[in-house]
Structure formats: structure tokens, C-alpha cells
Image (cartoon, helix red, strand yellow):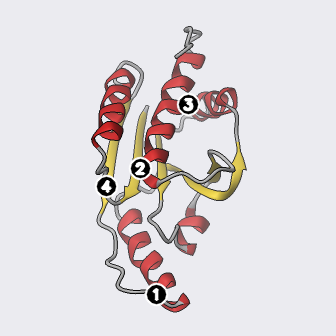
Amino acid sequence: MEIKIISVGKTKENYIQSGLDDYLERLQHYCDIKMIEIEPEKIRGKPTGAQIEQIKKNEGKRILDKIPEQDYIIALSVQGKPMTSEGLAKSIKNLRIQGRREISFVIGGSQGLSREIMEKSDYTLSLSHMTFTHQMIRLILVEQIYRAFKIINGEPYHK
């Protein structure tokens, strides 16, 4: 199975990058996983509503350019549906059973995801009702994907 995590912006904090590297290495035993970073739009001053929509649209186009047509797309959004770790494992397992071999998780920039991304997504996931930085969400997501594969394979996971 191939999993892509497509996110706007770079991971700047060393401690987050260290955590990502650790989980990405662990995940190599279960799937082909790639982190794809999209260049964010430059924001000057306080953008208007129309400017925010244009920022999201431009970032969304760059995101969609990285997603092959056959991928199952999971957009991360505060408006999404929450899921347990077991639920994520079951979803990934069911996608494999259905013959889906590629999943793209999409994390937007500071302004969120474009309407085009939300419409194209197969599922909208909320990782928490709390607010986290986009960098932290990457780490939380990668850890949850790792946990899902441990659950799928019946392996213990307690860290």
C-alpha cells in the first residue's frame, strides 16, 4: 500500500521532524509512505475573505497536482468526522480489501483547504476537537497511521 501525506509548508521544528523521521522509518515495514510538502502562498498583512479563498485555491491546485486520479483522498479538517485508532485501522484494512492501493492524506495551510480539495476528498477526518499546529498534526497523523498498521497486523502497541 502507498500512503502519501501532502501538506502545505515545511516542518520547521527539529523535534517534530525527529518524531516524523522515527515514525516514517517504522512505517517502512508496513507500507510505502511519502511526505510531500507544498509551497504555501505568501500572505501579506491581513487578507480579505476573497484573498483567503484565492490563497486556498492556489494551494489546492498545487495539492491536486500531487494526487494521482486513483488515490483515495482523506482531507484533514476541523469540520471532519472524528475516528478512533481502531476505526482508522479498519478503514485502511477495508480500503486494501476493496483493492485501493493508494491513500493521500491532505493537510492544508494556515487558511485551511480549498473547496476543490474538500469536494474531491473521499473522506474528511478530524483528528481532534482541539487546535494543533499544522506541523503537530503531521506528527499525530503519522503516529496514528503507524498505530493503525500495528492494529491491522495484530501487533502490540503501547507507546
Q: Which is more N-terminal, label 1 or label 3?
A: 1
Give neighbour class at mark 3: few <14, some 14-19, many 20+ (Cα, 10 Å): some
Amino acid type at circle 4 is: Glu
Residue under the point 41% across and 50% down: 135
Judging by the rendered image, the residue that carries numbered circle 1 is 47
Give SS at disc 3.
helix
Residue 29 lies, in percent from the top left, at 36, 18
Q: Nearer the viewer, residue 54 or 95?
A: 54
Quadrant for the N terminus in the image: top left
Ranked by sequence position, the earlier of labels 2 and 4 is 4
Q: Secondary structure at mark 1?
A: loop
Residue 125 pos. (x, y %): 63, 49
Q: Of tags 4 and 3, which is closer to the observer?
A: 4
Q: Say what amino acid the circle numbered 2 marks.
A: Gln
Q: Which residue is mark 4?
A: 37
Which numbered dot is residue 96?
3
Q: Amino acid at mark 3?
A: Arg
**What residue is drawn where x is 55% and y is 88%?**
49
